[in-house]
Each structure stands twice: as C-alpha cells, then as structure tokens.
Image (cartoon, helix red, strand yellow):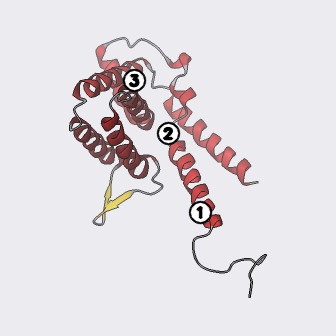
Amino acid sequence: MTTYGTIPTSSSASPSSNLDYISRAKERIKAGLGSRHPWRVMFDFHSLKLPSNFQEAFVRIKTNVSFFRMNYAIIVQLILFLSLLWHPISLIVFIIMMAAWLFLYFLRDEPLVVFGRMIDDRVVLIVLSVLTLVFLFLTDATVNILVSLLIGVVLVAVHAAFRRTDDLSLDEEAAGLMTATSARSSSS
C-alpha cells in the first residue's frame, strides 16, 4: 500500500515542528533583546551634557549602568568579540559562552530559579562575566582580553557619565508604550 500524496500522521519530528521551533526561537530573541532599551534613547545627543562635578558623574554612572545594563553588556561583548577575531580558540570559547549568555541572560522570559531560589539579573550578569573571563584567560589571549575589556569599560563609563539621567523615566514609559503599540499592531 502506497502513501504517496497523503498527509503523514506520525508523531516523529517533522519539518513543520522544526519550523515552529525556529519561529519560537526568533520570537524569544526579539522579546529578549526587546528588554534592552532602544539604542536611540541611549544615544540621544540632546541628553548628553558634561557633569558639573565628580559626585554628579558618579550618580549618573550608577543610574545609567542600572538603566542601560543590557545595552552596555552588548557593547562590551561586541568589543571583546572583535578583539578575539585573530585568536580562533578564544573565539570558539567566546561563542560557546555567548550561547550561555543568550539562554541565561538575554533571552530569559522568566526569572532564573536555581534550587528553588530566584536569582537576580545582576547576579547572573556577574557570574556569566566572571565565567566568560576565566574561560577566555585559559586560552592565552590575555592581552587582547584585558585591552578590549579596558576599552569597553572606559566607553561605558564615559557614556554613563555624560548621559543625563533626568529623562530616563520618561524614556522608559515611552519605550513601554512603543512596545505595547507594536505588539498590538503585530497581533492584528
């Protein structure tokens, strides 16, 4: 008996289930990266102003680092990636660690729970940063890693010190409104 032209009814993995998995992964990537603040808000030139003193710069850095935490993590990781292009073993380790970053930090919809305890995003960020550095230092690309991290930290600190913080709550509300509007328009 031939089954040519019939629709298979087996429960084995079919191409459509693979496509469903890929589309769910794409949605998770969009939603995960959507939790970062828009780049145009971060790089709004009207919000850049020289701090009047060291105390104001320190407060701005503290506020901006907590507000743009995911954006800053992306920037530092991009700089680190670019510095490892000429070290293939380090690049492989970095790509493996990026997969861990994607699943444990960038793409999570729900809080991370380990042994029944909820883990804060800052703890996940610190642990992943330390593990990434430890594994990369084991690949003998120490100079590249240190220079790229120094460049990334300096860029983040300069941006955070010069970016005013008085408009961040307004930006957050606008970003939330924009996300709700785009979600509504994509579902219709």
Q: Secondary structure at mark 3?
A: helix
User: Residue drawn at (62%, 44%), measured in percent from left and top?
Assistant: 179
- Residue 36 bears which disc, if any? 2
The residue identified by callout 3 is: 160
Do labels 3 and 2 touch, CB within 8 Å? no
Please report whichever mark, 2 or 1, sits nearer to the chain's N-terminal start: 1
Instruction: Specify the amino acid type for callout 1.
Output: Asn
Please report whichever mark, 1 or 3, sits nearer to the chain's N-terminal start: 1
* x, y percent for residue 161: 38, 19
Looking at this rendering, what residue extends furthest in the front direction? 1
User: Residue drawn at (30%, 66%), measured in percent from left and top?
Assistant: 116
Q: CA distance from mark 3 to mark 2?
A: 16 Å
* x, y percent for residue 55: 29, 19
* x, y percent for residue 95: 39, 42
Do labels 2 and 1 touch, CB within 8 Å? no
Q: Secondary structure at mark 2?
A: loop
* Viewport quadrant of the N terminus: bottom right
Residue 173: name its quadrant: top right
Task: Please determine whether, in this image, residue 125 is positioned above or below residue 85.
Answer: below
Instruction: Specify the amino acid type for callout 2.
Output: Arg
- Residue 18 bears which disc, if any? 1
**Disc 3 residue crowd, few under 14, some 14–19, many 20+, Cα 10 Å:** many
- Residue 172 bears which disc, if any? none
User: Residue drawn at (67%, 80%), measured in percent from left and top?
Assistant: 9
Instruction: Specify the amino acid type for callout 3.
Output: Ala
